[in-house]
Amino acid sequence: MGKSYRDRRDHDDNESIDNRVVYIHLDEIYVSDATWHKLMTRDGQQIEAYRQAYENGEEMVRVVLRPRYDGGYNVEDGRHRVIAAKQAGVGHIEAIIIGSIG
């Protein structure tokens, strides 16, 4: 699937996108129960396709995360992929971290 369109956005000259790419344990990524249920009800087929892709080891678009004040991360882009990765039992997910706390 390759890189997200967000990878091509303008960014600080001193910080390349690749310097912000990290692997985050899925337990650190927060998706509310309400969001999970809504997306599974509405987009279950898409999430299932992503789950299968993760299980098959396919390259996926990076998710975009923002740090939470109480620890962990909120999903800015990629909720479907995070849910699919959690369902597939993937331990970590490739992510771009944006923003900071404080």
Image: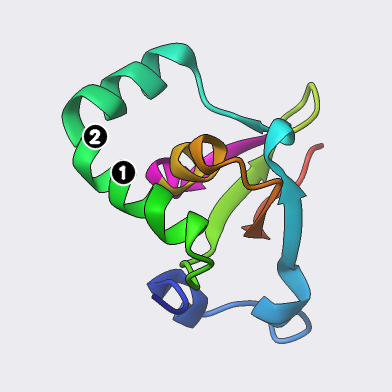
Q: Nearer the viewer, residue 63 or 15?
A: 63
Q: Is residue 35 above or below residue 16?
A: above
Which quadrant of the structure image shows residue 6?
Answer: bottom left
| C-beta proximity under 8 Å, tags 1 and 2 | yes
| Dot 1 crowding, Cα within 10 Å, few <14, some 14–19, many 20+ | some
Left or right relative to 38: residue 42: left
Q: Residue 1's spot in the image, x, y percent?
A: 39, 75
As for residue 81 lying within the magenta part, the answer is no
**Where residue 48 is drawn, which disc sits there?**
1
Element assignment for label 1: helix
Does dot 2 land on a helix, a strand or a loop?
helix
Query: Is residue 32 or residue 100 the one in the foreground?
Result: 32
Pinpoint residue 54: horizontal percent, then vertical percent. Answer: 49, 57
Q: Measured from the top left, where is residue 29 in percent x and y?
A: 65, 35
3 up-or-down from 28: above or below:
below
Measuring 53% from the left and 56% from the top, which residue is drawn there?
A: 63
Residue drawn where x is 46% and y is 67% of the image: 61
Q: Furthest residue to the front?
A: 56
- The image quarter containing residue 70 is top right
Residue in the foreground of this view, choosing between 49 and 11:
49
- Residue range in magenta is 73-80
Residue tagged 2: 44
Outermost residue toward the top in this view: 34
